Image (cartoon, helix red, strand yellow):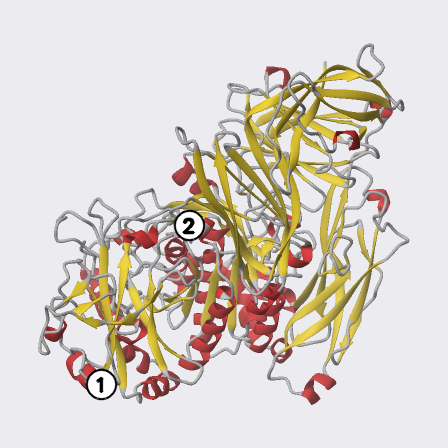
């Protein structure tokens, strides 16, 4: 494919000058055509377009944006050149291990000669023609040739690409050799390397690094048989990507119409044994087989995306660096143990090694178990405390709209976390939707115990993807919002660098929050500082950079009481505890401790002094403390109270106390040093007067909006039923549509997916949550309207509770009897709430189940083989972690593999819980499988001792039905407060339970 060649910047200036002269001489001046505003890739919404237009050099040039993701495809149109014509992608690394190929010593095949050797793998793949390469392998035994194979079979469990060379099959194999060649010979034949030439021209630090690296006597070369014909003579020797920016693609001589589906790059890692003796090297191929990383890269820094003029990412002048952390053989491209940590360490070292500012975008993460307390979040805070000019942007998470759903590591106070904003213009162009007002995507995670999101940015875009992705290239998520923010940060950092301003990540984060544009209709937990505004943030950043006091402190570590946290502390006050909210005269105290710049020495830290004044953003939130100060490293305490009289109605209340520098060298928005977040959630109560039931009438809910309802589960409740109705009876029009989400007190979704209730479709949607999932506390019921709704939505929401106590101990130990002798059991049921149950009760033995504790030591992978057959043709597994264990991970994947190693089920933990189910394929009467758990530990040392609870169930092909009767005879009624004994009998028989398992089933009560 041919791409438009960018005009060099100096030439562009000359052309513009010529146009100006001609225009002046013309009788009628014609205005230059204004750049088109593209809502497909909406950098306009953040002000990035306008910021660059005011000064075209403020486009991120001189800054590298590191994408920690699934990789970046160097062939994607828009990811090839910067605005100044330089190579866009300047470094690649794979920390996911997906691209790591082990090699072995090449065997000399007898079909070759000493002059024309033929190399062979252990299984007989042959490679000839190496002697004709510009730098052939030597015969020096100290530098042997190693060989390896890229097989399409290695991509068996990749959901995106299997046919690597697009020839219509998935059985191809591509051999490669790797060997060390004398540097002098390599540079004489191939040159110093385009990458090295580029880097050493940047600055003195980079030039010195290139000089050091070139002191080695030998260079690793990799030669790949890219067309699979066994001949290397027509191939190009590849060096580490950073050296020469070498890129290749796999092809086929037999498929002339095949496409280059994916760009490949390579790095080589030398290996040695414990005594230092050399071992075969590892060849680390880099590629984006998941599309996600390339998509994010285009949003952050794409230039002429799709070859389209003016269709740019936020920072088109920035360079890109791909640090692959996601393994696409696992669900969602999950991270692997240490991959995230290694990538951050590499980015920090890159900045120091090459003297180039680094902005990190990581649109990766999982549900937080306890916001801010995960191992990765603590480690990141420590890393950034030592690297003040490393700027980290992350996605807030896609677990909204519930509160307290910010992801991991987005809850880290040192990173910039972005929620997903949606503008009407973008909705129209990407979704054929007509929004009445700007909003958030409902899925965008909200804050609770963490002061998140920091800001919001456009959460949808059409962007760059590899060629194998035949879709529209339109993705949505906070994954798309974060690179918008990262691109703006790159523009700000580049502009500061050009202006000679000394800044750090704390200044940039403060500038983004203070300079953000609040989105009307959104709450603090939804949007934090508001929509990213590049121009306003630049004004704040410029003021901060000229302040001595702003340099001394990176950020402030804040701690306040938090009931849901393991250690009882969080950075935000989040009260969602029925009867336990600290209304005045109770006090809410925040301890505030400075995180000093690492250049601030011990004496300067000891002499540090700063005074603050405070302002509340809400009448119900009152600051008791007057002006406060910090002296040295000691914590400052700020005390607030909540006016309970203003917080009586059920709902969510959220506001900040803003701490501004008092008597220092800053004023206005730049003086805002810290924010104390407060959220109070008051639930509606339920009692016998209304039959433990409430209804709400929702009116005029606009597109992509959320109505939140909070309910306190009454004592003794064992079931919550929720009904959502959209009909003519509720006043809804034909274009209305809403769905329901139920969140428990800690923000975890319960009850499943409701589906949309629509006047023109299913008008009623019912969800229920039963014990043990239902537990006391304040639950959140979110009614969400669709993006593409043609009208506002009117609806009715009805919530009711019921309560029963059940003693099922009499069902334990059930076993099949001889034919004609039913198996019997008993249970006792007591209705807790007033009223009488009259209805039908059914029972069945559905299979075998058991629960056990799994202990895993010194590995991140655990496996369980199992077999399904005609008797038990289906299995289901539920895995549960403790919070302590859950905080150790950056991902935890769950697979079910068939006998060939193919992942027939690919999922992962959602917070502390994970599930996987599998059934025999049609026509099969037996099959073996393996349940596989692959943990990704933030810190590798933590895999020494971990585990989870495993609940497993194997379903019978034919459930055994039972009958339920009142033990004493008579009608089956359950009166409140009266224990009722029931007998259960199963006439049928079933096989004996496998070891460690017991018969499992249900007794279901349906009130008629």
Q: Residue at x 84, y 25 (%)?
A: 830
Quadrant of the snapshot with the C terminus: top right
Q: Closest to the observer: 222 or 15?
A: 222
Which numbered mark, 1 or 2, is in the foreground of this view? 1
Q: Residue at x 51, y 43 (%)?
A: 866
Q: Residue 182, labelled with which disc?
A: 1
Separation of residues labelled 1 and 2 (CA atoms): 49 Å
What crowding class fits label 2: few (fewer than 14 Cα within 10 Å), some (14-19), or many (20 or more)?
many
Q: Is residue 452 left or right of residue 211?
A: right
Residue ranking furthest to the front? 818
Q: Are marks 1 and 2 in contact (CB under 8 Å)?
A: no
On the question of residue 192 being in view, the answer is yes
User: Looking at the image, is 485 positioned above or below residue 182?
Assistant: above
Q: Which residue is mark 2?
A: 42
Dot 1 or dot 2, earlier in sequence:
2
* Residue at disc 2, secondary structure: loop
Give the x, y percent position of residue 724.
63, 25
Q: Quadrant of residue 99?
A: bottom left
What crowding class fits label 1: few (fewer than 14 Cα within 10 Å), some (14-19), or many (20 or more)?
some
User: Looking at the image, is 994 positioned above or below residue 448?
Assistant: above
Give the x, y percent position of residue 2.
18, 55
Numbered marks: total: 2
* Residue at disc 1, secondary structure: strand
Give the x, y percent position of residue 688.
86, 24
Give the x, y percent position of residue 240.
30, 73
Q: Closest to the observer: 539 or 294?
A: 294
Q: Is residue 116 left or right of residue 492?
A: left
Q: Closest to the observer: 94 or 426?
A: 94
On the question of residue 887 being in view, the answer is no
Q: Residue at x 29, y 61 (%)?
A: 74
Q: Residue 198, labelled with which disc?
A: none
């Amino acid at each position: 494919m041919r791409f438009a060649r960018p005009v060099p910047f100096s030439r562009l200036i000359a052309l513009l000058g010529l146009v100006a002269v001609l225009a002046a001489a013309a009788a009628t001046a014609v205005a230059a055509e204004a750049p088109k505003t593209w809502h497909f890739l909406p950098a306009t919404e953040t002000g990035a377009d306008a910021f660059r237009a005011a000064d075209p050099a403020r486009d991120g040039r001189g800054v590298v944006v590191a994408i920690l993701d699934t990789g970046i495809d160097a062939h994607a149109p828009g990811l090839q050149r910067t605005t100044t014509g330089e190579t866009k992608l300047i470094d690649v690394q794979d920390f996911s291990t997906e691209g790591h190929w082990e090699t072995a010593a090449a065997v000399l095949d007898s079909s070759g000669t000493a002059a024309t050797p033929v190399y062979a793998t252990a299984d007989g793949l042959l490679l000839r023609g190496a002697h004709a390469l510009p730098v052939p392998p030597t015969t020096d035994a100290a530098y042997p040739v190693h060989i390896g194979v890229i097989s399409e079979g290695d991509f068996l469990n990749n959901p995106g690409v299997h046919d690597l060379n697009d020839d219509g099959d998935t059985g191809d194999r591509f051999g490669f050799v790797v060997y060390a060649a004398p540097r002098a010979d390599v540079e004489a034949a191939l040159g110093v390397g385009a990458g090295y030439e580029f880097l050493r021209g940047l600055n003195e630090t980079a030039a010195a690094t290139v000089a050091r690296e070139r002191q080695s006597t030998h260079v690793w070369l990799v030669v790949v048989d890219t067309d699979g014909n066994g001949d290397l003579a027509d191939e190009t020797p590849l060096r580490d990507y950073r050296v020469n920016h070498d890129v290749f693609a796999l092809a086929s001589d037999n498929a002339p119409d095949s496409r280059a589906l994916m760009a490949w790059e390579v790095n080589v890692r030398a290996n040695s044994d414990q005594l230092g003796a050399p071992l075969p090297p590892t060849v680390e191929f880099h590629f984006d087989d998941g599309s996600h990383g390339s998509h994010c890269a285009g949003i952050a820094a794409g230039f002429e995306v799709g070859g389209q003029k003016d269709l740019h990412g936020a920072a088109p002048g920035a360079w890109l660096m791909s640090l692959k952390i996601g393994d696409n053989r696992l669900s969602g491209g999950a991270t692997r143990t240490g991959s995230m940590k290694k990538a951050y360490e590499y980015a920090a070292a890159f900045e120091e090694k090459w003297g180039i500012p680094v902005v990190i975008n990581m649109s990766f993460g999982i549900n937080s178990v306890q916001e801010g307390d995960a191992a990765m979040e603590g480690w990141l805070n420590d890393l950034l405390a030592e690297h003040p000019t490393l700027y980290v942007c992350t996605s807030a998470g896609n677990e909204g709209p519930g509160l307290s759903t910010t992801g991991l590591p987005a809850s880290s106070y040192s990173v910039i976390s972005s929620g997903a904003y949606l503008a009407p213009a973008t909705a129209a162009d990407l979704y054929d939707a007509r929004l009445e007002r700007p909003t958030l995507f409902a899925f965008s995670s909200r804050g609770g115990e963490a002061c998140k999101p920091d800001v919001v940015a456009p959460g949808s875009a059409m962007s760059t993807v590899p060629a194998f992705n035949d879709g529209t290239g339109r993705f949505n998520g906070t994954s798309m919002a974060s690179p918008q923010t990262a691109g703006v940060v790159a523009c700000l950092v580049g502009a500061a660098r050009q202006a000679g301003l000394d800044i750090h990540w704390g200044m940039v984060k403060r500038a983004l929050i203070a300079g953000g544009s609040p989105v009307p209709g959104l709450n603090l937990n939804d949007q934090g500082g508001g929509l990213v505004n590049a121009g306003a943030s630049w004004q704040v950043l410029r003021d901060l950079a000229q302040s001595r006091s702003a340099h001394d402190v990176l950020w402030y570590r804040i701690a306040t009481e938090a009931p849901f946290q393991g250690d009882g502390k969080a950075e935000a006050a989040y009260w969602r505890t029925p009867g336990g909210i600290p209304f005045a005269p109770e006090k809410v105290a925040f301890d505030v401790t400075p995180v000093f710049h690492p250049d601030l020495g011990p004496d300067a830290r000891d002499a540090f002094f700063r005074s603050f004044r405070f302002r509340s953003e809400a009448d119900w939130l009152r600051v008791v403390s007057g002006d406060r100060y910090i002296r040295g490293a000691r914590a400052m305490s700020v005390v607030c109270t909540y006016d309970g009289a203003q917080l009586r109605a059920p709902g969510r209340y959220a506001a900040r106390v803003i701490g501004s520098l008092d008597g220092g060298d800053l004023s206005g928005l730049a003086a805002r040093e810290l924010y104390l977040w407060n959220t109070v959630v008051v639930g509606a109560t339920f009692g016998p007067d209304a039959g433990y039931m409430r209804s709400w009438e929702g009116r005029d809910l606009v597109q992509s909006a959320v109505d939140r309802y909070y309910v306190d589960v009454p004592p003794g409740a064992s079931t919550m039923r929720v009904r959502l109705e959209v009909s003519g009876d509720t006043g809804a029009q034909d274009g209305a549509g809403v769905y329901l989400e139920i969140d428990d007190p800690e923000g975890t979704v319960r009850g499943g997916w409701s589906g949309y209730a629509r006047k023109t479709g299913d008008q009623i949607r019912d969800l229920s949550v039963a014990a043990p999932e239902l537990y006391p506390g304040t639950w959140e019921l979110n009614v969400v309207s669709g993006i593409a709704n043609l009208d506002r939505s009117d609806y009715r929401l009805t919530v009711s509770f019921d309560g029963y106590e059940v003693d099922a101990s009499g069902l334990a130990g059930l076993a099949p009897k001889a034919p004609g002798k039913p198996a019997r059991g008993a249970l006792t049921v007591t209705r807790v709430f007033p009223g009488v149950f009259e209805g039908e009760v059914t029972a069945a033995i559905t299979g075998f189940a058991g629960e056990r504790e799994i202990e895993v030591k010194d590995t991140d992978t655990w496996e369980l083989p199992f077999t399904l057959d005609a008797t038990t043709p289906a299995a289901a597994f539920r895995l549960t972690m403790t919070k302590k264990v859950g905080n150790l991970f950056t991902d935890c994947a769950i697979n079910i593999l068939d006998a060939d190693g193919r992942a027939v089920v690919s999922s992962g933990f959602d917070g502390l819980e994970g599930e996987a189910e599998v059934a025999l394929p049609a026509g099969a009467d037996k099959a073996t499988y393996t349940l596989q758990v692959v943990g990704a530990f933030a810190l590798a040392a933590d895999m020494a001792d971990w585990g989870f609870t495993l609940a497993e169930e194997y379903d019978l092909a034919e459930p055994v039905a039972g009958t339920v009767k009142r033990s004493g005879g008579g009608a089956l009624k359950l009166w409140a407060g009266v224990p009722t004994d029931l007998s259960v009998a199963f006439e049928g028989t079933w096989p004996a339970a496998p070891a460690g398992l017991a018969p499992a089933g249900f007794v279901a009560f349906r009130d008629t």
